[in-house]
Amino acid sequence: AHAHELRGRCRTPASSELTLRTAMTDSLTEQDFRLQSDRALEHAERGLLPLADELGFEVERNNGVLQVIFEDPAPAKFVVSPNAPVRQVWVSAMSRSYKLSWSDALDAFALDGERLDDLLARLARAYVEA
C-alpha cells in the first residue's frame, strides 16, 4: 500500500499486539516466507492430487494461490493463500478461516500441530463425505 493510502488509518499497536506480531514474524524473513509458502502450496497441491482423483474434486494453483474446487455434494471452493505481512498461510474453507504459522519443529506451516497438507486433506474428505 502506498503511504498516502494509509494516512488516517495508522495507529500504534498495543504492546501485547506488537509482541505477538513480532513473535509470529521472527522465525522467517519475508524472502524465506515467500520461498517456504511457495513450497508449501506446491507440496499441498501434489499431496491433494491423488485424493482429488479418488474423491472427484479439482486442485489448481495460480498466481501463488491454491484452490480446491468441488462440484459435489455442492459447488464450493477452498482458497489457500500466503499472507506475507503476518508470515502465515491462510485457508478459507467451509465458511471458516484457518491461519497457519511456520513451525520450525514440523518444518511446515501448521495450525495446532496439523500441517497444511494434512489440514487440507482432512477438510476435503469432510466436505465430500458430509
Image (cartoon, rainbow, N blue to C red):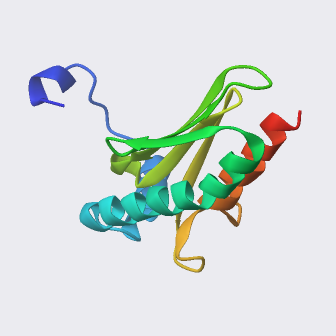
Q: Image height check: is 30 above or below 84? A: below
Of 104 and 65, the residue lying toward us: 65
In the drawing, does residue 61 fall left or right of residue 98?
left
Residue at 40 percent across and 55 percent down: it is: 87
Q: Is residue 69 above or below residue 63?
A: above
Image point (69%, 26%), residue name: 95
Asked where in the image residue 129 lies, by quadrant, the reply is top right
Q: Position of residue 77 (x, y in %)?
A: 60, 29
Give x and y (percent) for residue 110: 61, 62
Q: Quadrant of the C terminus?
A: top right
Q: Is residue 6 above or below residue 97?
A: above
Across and down, in percent, residue 25 comes to 39, 61
Quarter placement of the N terminus: top left
Q: Residue pushed farthest right?
A: 130
User: For the image shown, how many numbered marks are present on the structure?
Assistant: 0
Query: Quick check: can you spot residue 101?
Result: no
Residue placed farthest to the bottom in the image? 105
* Residue 2 falls in image quadrant: top left
Query: Residue at position x 17%, y 21% from top?
Result: 5
Residue 20 visible somewhere in the drawing = yes
- Image point (31%, 59%), residue name: 34
Q: Nearer the viewer, residue 16 or 41?
A: 41
